[in-house]
Each structure stands twice: as structure tokens, then as C-alpha cells.
Image (cartoon, rainbow, N blue to C red):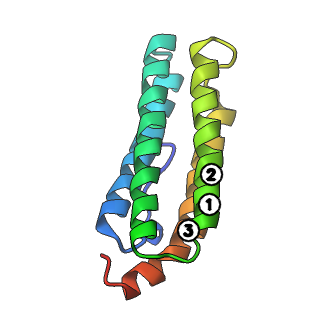
């Protein structure tokens, strides 16, 4: 059973970003499955690296979209991305070094953060970009 499911309410009405959000949800589910099935530290760390790398990729795409369309909330959004990127990369590094392991607390944090980020922060730019003709 998936930890996290896509809901239509997550749509920001920008197809590329919606697809990237779906991929992030799929990666969180992949990490959860690797963790709960006891697949081993190497597999969990590889999936966590994939999630961290894709998070950086997604944020850069989203930031570029906001920047090129002169989104007025860009500076605040960028700051939230930078904080989350730092957390995910630190988690990845700590797991790789064996300082922490992926637990349900970590999974709940990732799920909760993405849910709140999409429904809160990302949904704020949706009407602006739609008015600019971005879809």
C-alpha cells in the first residue's frame, strides 16, 4: 500500500510541474517501500539519493518557471526550496554515513512537507502562472 497518493487538489495547472510532483510522490513511496520491506541500507540509500537528486532538479525547474514569468512571490518560495534542499541533502548524507536511518518519522516528514508545500506554497503561484498563459 502506498504511503502517499496523488490527489487532483495537488494540481497547480502546469502540466510539467504536476508530473514532477507525481514523480516526487512516487519516489517517496519507493523509499517507503524499500524501508518497510527491509531491502537493505544500500537500496534505501540509493532511493534516498534518487529522491534528493530529483528534488533539486524539480526545484530548479519550478524556480526557473517562476523567475522567467516574474512571479512576485519568487524570493520567499526560493527560500523555502533552499531550506528543504538543505534538509534532504543533510538527511541523505547522514544516512549514507550511518548516523541516522530512514524511519517512519522521516517518511512522515517528507510526506507532510510535500503535501503542505504543494497545497500551500505551490498553489499560490498557480493563478499567477495561469494568468500568464503557462499551462
Contact check, label 1 and label 2, Cβ < 8 Å: yes
Q: Nearer the viewer, residue 56 or 31?
A: 56
Quadrant position of the N terminus in the picture: top left
Residue at 32% in and 77% down: 134
Q: Nearer the viewer, residue 16 or 119?
A: 16
Q: Is residue 53 above or below residue 130?
A: above
Near mark 1 (Cα within 10 A), the count class, few <14, some 14-19 or many ≥20, is few
Q: Label 2's element? A: helix
Near mark 2 (Cα within 10 A), the count class, few <14, some 14-19 or many ≥20, is few
Q: Label 3's element? A: helix
Residue 89 placed where, x, y %?
A: 58, 32
Contact check, label 3 and label 2, Cβ < 8 Å: no
Contact check, label 3 and label 1, Cβ < 8 Å: no
What distance separates the C-alpha of mark 3 from that of mark 2? 19 Å
The answer to whether any part of residue 33 appears in the image is: no
Q: Is residue 63 above or below residue 25?
A: below
The answer to whether any part of residue 23 appears in the image is: yes
- Residue 74 is marked as 3
Residue at the spot of label 2: 113
Q: Nearer the viewer, residue 70 or 115?
A: 70
What distance separates the C-alpha of mark 3 from that of mark 1? 17 Å
What distance separates the C-alpha of mark 1 from that of mark 2? 5 Å
Near mark 3 (Cα within 10 A), the count class, few <14, some 14-19 or many ≥20, is some
117 vs 66, left or right, is right
118 vs 79, left or right, is left
Q: Label 1's element? A: helix
Residue at 43% in and 35% down: 53
Residue at the spot of label 1: 116
Residue 119 placed where, x, y %?
A: 56, 67
Amino acid at each position: 500500500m502506498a504511503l502517499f497518493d496523488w490527489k487532483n487538489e495537488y494540481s497547480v495547472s502546469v502540466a510539467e510541474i504536476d508530473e514532477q510532483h507525481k514523480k516526487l510522490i512516487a519516489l517517496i513511496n519507493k523509499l517507503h517501500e524499500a524501508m518497510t520491506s527491509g531491502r537493505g541500507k544500500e537500496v534505501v540509500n540509493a532511493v534516498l539519493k534518487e529522491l534528493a537528486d530529483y528534488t533539486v532538479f524539480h526545484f530548479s525547474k519550478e524556480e526557473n518557471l517562476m523567475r522567467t514569468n516574474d512571479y512576485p512571490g519568487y524570493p520567499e518560495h526560493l527560500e523555502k526550496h533552499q531550506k528543504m534542499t538543505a534538509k534532504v541533502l543533510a538527511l541523505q548524507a547522514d544516512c549514507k554515513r550511518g548516523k541516522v536511518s530512514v524511519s517512519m518519522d522521516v517518511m512522515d516528514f517528507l510526506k507532510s512537507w510535500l503535501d503542505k508545500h504543494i497545497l500551500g506554497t505551490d498553489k499560490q503561484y498557480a493563478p499567477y502562472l495561469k494568468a500568464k498563459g503557462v499551462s
